[in-house]
Image (spheres, rainbow, N blue to C red):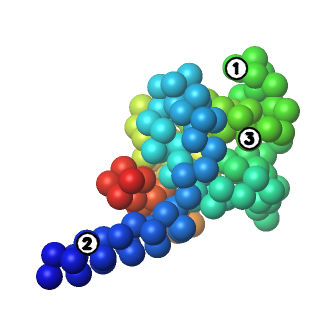
Amino acid sequence: MLLTVVAAITVFYFISASFFPRSYEKEINRAASATGLDADLIRAVIWTESKFDENAVSGAGASGLMQMTDETRDFISARTGVTADGSAGSEIYLGSAYLKYLIDKCGDETDALMSYNAGYYNVMRWKKEGSEPYPETRDYVGRVEFALRVYRYIF
């Protein structure tokens, strides 16, 4: 019985590891240290945004590991003084810095994640009007929270 449980846990771990990679560890840990964010939150956002594909491009024109638009990249680059040079390190740092900026501005991690997906002003409008976020945005936050639980508790 114990052998069966150990085997099941081992299989589950390897399956989880293949679906939830732990790539770019040095860059993620450096960004977490610099921004004060939880490294697992950064991993969860990268997983949700790009599945760790540096070449990912969205229909809205966002690109890279953390799926930022050029406008967002330029904004946070000017704010932090870090050049967006296309490397994984700068991409992860800038995306993390932008998420930290949103958390500080919103005062709430969930609102910050919604803002990362749909834009800060949309989130503020929804809150002011008492309306619901886009279904895509609700799903996005759920996917980030799911990935965060996987990274925190399985790994």
Q: Is residue 19 above or below residue 103?
A: below
**Residue type indicated by callout 3:** Ala
Q: Residue 88, which numbered label? A: 3
Q: Residue 50, which numbered label? A: none
**Residue type indicated by callout 2:** Val
Q: CA distance from mark 3 to mark 2?
A: 36 Å
Left/right placement of residue 44 relative to residue 74 reads left
Crowd rating for badge 1 (residues with CA inside 10 Å; few <14, some 14–19, many 20+): few
Tell me the quadrant of the picture where the N terminus can be found. bottom left
| Residue position for label 2 | 6
Residue 132 in percent (x, y) is at: 46, 61
- The answer to which of 93 and 142 lies nearer the viewer is 93
Q: CA distance from mark 1 to mark 2?
A: 47 Å
| Residue position for label 1 | 80
In this rendering, the label closer to the viewer, 3 or 2: 2
The quarter holding residue 76 reads top right
- The furthest residue to the front: 3
SS at badge 3: helix
